[in-house]
Image: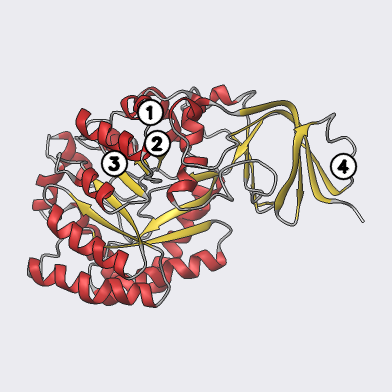
Amino acid sequence: MPEADLLVTGLDELATPTQAGPIRGEAMGQLRVVEDAALAIAGGRIQRVGSAEELADVDADRRWEAEGGTLVPGFVDAHTHVVWAGDRARELAMKLEGASYEEILAAGGGIHSTVASTREASEDELVGQTRARLDRCLAAGTTTMEAKTGYDLTVEGELALLAVLAELDATHPMDLVPTLMGAHAIPDDVERAAFVRELVEELTPRAARQGLTAFCDVFVDEGAFTVDEGRAILAAGREAGLEVRIHADELARTGAARLGLELDAASIDHCNRVTAEDVQALAEASVEGWDGVATLCPVTPFTSDVPYPPARDLVEAGVPVALGSDLNPNAWSEGMWFTLALAVHELGLTPAEALTAATANAAASLRRSDVGRLVEGCVADAVLVDVPSHEHVGYRVDGPPIEAVVKAGERVV
């Protein structure tokens, strides 16, 4: 009987982080790089990695001879809002005329516009629209994706969005990691304090009891939820057994990143307006035992009037950095290739650091150590990129030049 199900050969290069995240500091730029590489897969997991010469003795049921290219881990998208209906194309003209995020929201656009469209859609329509997005993200190399709710803002509607994500996770090749985000905005038709109580006392415990999510998230920012409101909602999540994620200091510096540390967040996201003191606090917490990451979403400042986050400062201070596409109707970018390009050109990450941020560290934000790495025993999720080396990550802005995608040992693209 063959010892491997599949043997992949003919690769110019294989590049991967080797240690499980969170990876910080100089280690973010340290990859295992194998030239003329080969990969053996058995039972959906990686059995052996090495050069073609080192794996020449592998007896495999199937062989796949690639025509060059670079094999990297399947991309892990650590921050998305992938389930919604409708679009917000008309807001582009408002942005070009100088309208801010808060002004668009006040005019009935932004999240409120998408909430209205999503509430009008049937569950089947939401499944269909979201599945189409997932198909395109998979074709662009994303094999694991964090997926937030947040575009219904009612108890039953948010639970229904979690059910949509559960159905898609069960029927789509991509792994979805759902996050409850009923605290995405204050609905226009509900009194603020009453809505916060509803999130704390009803939605969060119900979602946890139903086993529909392992994470909860709150948009703590100017025009959204206050630090005190975020603390109450996220504490309710922790009490119900959910791990914390947090939208922090994106539109304004509110202290939300510090709140994330206080609540031991798995992921502190955006961080566009964190201060040097905040960066130092994150770095010190990481040394002292905080095992979360700072998940940066560079597509958002590309499409909106907010600064890019201080990624270089975070990395050099020793804060583990992950990447997310922030796929949503305001930053509609399907897949991670453009995110990686912005991470290099705008955030100042090296190609190796960006790759680590989009794989092992993104996986760590989801409390996963079995994806995001091409090492023995990990799930065999991989992307064959039509470039000669990993140094083309970020350098190639267009594309993505994806040749093939492997999910759990099976070629799906």
* CA distance for labels 4 and 1: 39 Å
Determine the image quadrant of residue 344.
top left
Q: Quickly name the residue at label 3.
A: 270
Q: Quickly name the residue at label 2.
A: 321
Please tell me how crowded label 2 is: few (under 14), some (14-19), or many (20+) other residues with Cα within 10 Å: many
Measuring from the top left, give residue 103's x and y in whole percent.
9, 45
Q: Secondary structure at mark 1?
A: helix
Q: Earlier in the sequence, mark 3 or mark 4?
A: 4
Q: Secondary structure at mark 3?
A: strand
4 vs 1, front mark: 1
Measuring from the top left, give residue 144's x and y in whole percent.
52, 51
Q: Earlier in the sequence, mark 4 or mark 1?
A: 4
User: Quick one: 191 or 120, which is closer to the camera?
Assistant: 191
2 vs 3, front mark: 2
* CA distance for labels 3 and 1: 14 Å
Q: Residue 315: give its label.
A: 1
Q: Earlier in the sequence, mark 2 or mark 3?
A: 3
Please tell me how crowded label 1 is: few (under 14), some (14-19), or many (20+) other residues with Cα within 10 Å: many
Residue 388 vertical position relative to residue 20 in the rendered view, above or below: above
Q: Secondary structure at mark 2?
A: strand
Q: Secondary structure at mark 4?
A: loop
Mark yes or no: residue 38 visible.
no
Q: Quadrant of the N terminus?
A: bottom right
* CA distance for labels 3 and 4: 44 Å
Residue 94 vertical position relative to residue 34 in the rendered view, above or below: below
3 vs 1, front mark: 1
Q: Amino acid at mark 1?
A: Val
- Residue at x-position 46% and y-position 44%: 362
Q: Quickly name the residue at label 4.
A: 58
> Badges 1 and 2: C-beta atoms under 8 Å apart?
yes
> Badges 3 and 1: C-beta atoms under 8 Å apart?
no
- Residue at x-position 48% and y-position 39%: 358
